[in-house]
Amino acid sequence: MSIRPDSTMLVALYGELVPHPWRDPLAASSDAYSLFVARSSALGWLTEAVEDASGGLWGMNDAGQDPVAAVAGSRPARVAWFQVSLTTPVPADRPLPVQAFLSCAGDVVARLGTPRLRAVQVLLPVQGLDAPADASSRRSAVMTLLQDAGWFADADPGLRTRVRVTLDGGQDPSIRSAAPEMLRWIRELDQDVFSCDSVSVTDDDDVVLEPAVVDEVWLGPARHRATFQATLAEWSLEALGWLAALLADAGSRHGVGTPLMFTAAPSGSSPGRA
């Protein structure tokens, strides 16, 4: 297996996780790591950790389930996290495989207990996307995302959720200049999954979680970010995975070539600092 440098993708889930009554974590034969390996392998997304392995989307790095903790005030607990490395460059006609990644994480968490998510954080290796050479580059990637948006076409309108999404570039400031153009580009797309009202590049320390990864894995610590206020088709890992892939593609198209830390939470409930 050939894991490329700077290809880390990580998701951290925040909120509450009520363990299944029949599952004793101390006696269970599986944990977050082994369940994620099994699930992503079953779906054909895992690249086996053997020399010259081919196929799959990612190689497994690490995973963990944090102890169940009481949620105090606006500070959600981190309940689980998963870290992988993309094993091949992302094809020019494909988005980052974030939706598959979050779907797998959601399946694993559902095996562990009943989750109530209050915030989701994803490290997006935007540098793994081909830099656009002209206005038509990566058109197939966004067309794939627009086709995938059909999954949410007939969703219950009552599930639509106001969300606040931040993209943090760490020590790289390019997200600040790219964000207004990203917003204009997203508004031109024929989709109803993510309806964005505004974007701000001002600092607000009360609306972000501390990154759930060491600075060396991206360009941390957190510093330069843009905040999008929007409505999402539903508050689910499927919708958030789709959105994260769209924003990664939008960032790449508008000059961002470094990792971005994506953090999302329903509006009106600040995730606070973890």
Image (cartoon, rainbow, N blue to C red):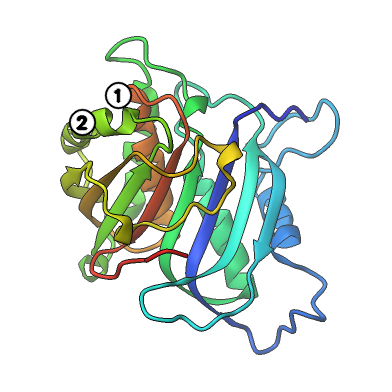
Q: Is residue 138 above or below residue 155?
A: above
The one nearer the camera, 11 or 209, is: 209
Q: Is residue 167 above or below residue 229?
A: above
Task: Report the mark closest to the observer, 2 or 1.
Answer: 1
The one nearer the camera, 148 or 231, is: 231
| Residue that badge 2 annotates | 185
Residue 29, given in percent of the width and then of the height, sits at: 82, 72
Instruction: Tell me the residue at 39%/53% (across/down).
Output: 263
| Residue that badge 1 annotates | 254
Q: Identity of the amino acid at label 1?
A: His
Determine crowd level at label 2: few under 14, some 14-19, many 20+ residues with C-alpha closer than 10 A: few
Give the quarter of the image for residue 202: top left
Residue 25, given in percent of the width and then of the height, sits at: 74, 79
Q: Is residue 166 above or below residue 27?
A: above
Instruction: Tell me the residue at 40%/36% (across/down).
Output: 169
User: Looking at this rendering, what residue extends furthest in the right direction?
Assistant: 51
Q: Identity of the amino acid at label 2?
A: Trp
Which element carries disc 1, helix, strand or loop?
loop
Quarter of the image with the N terminus is top right
Q: Is 174 on the left or on the right of 257, as rendered?
A: left
Query: In the rendered structure, which disc, 2 or 1, sits on the residue that comes first in sequence?
Result: 2
Q: Is 240 on the left or on the right of 81, as rendered?
A: left
Q: Is 14 on the left or on the right of 249, as rendered?
A: right
State if disc 1 and disc 2 touch (CB < 8 Å).
yes
The one nearer the camera, 49 or 4, is: 4
Give the quarter of the image for residue 172: top left
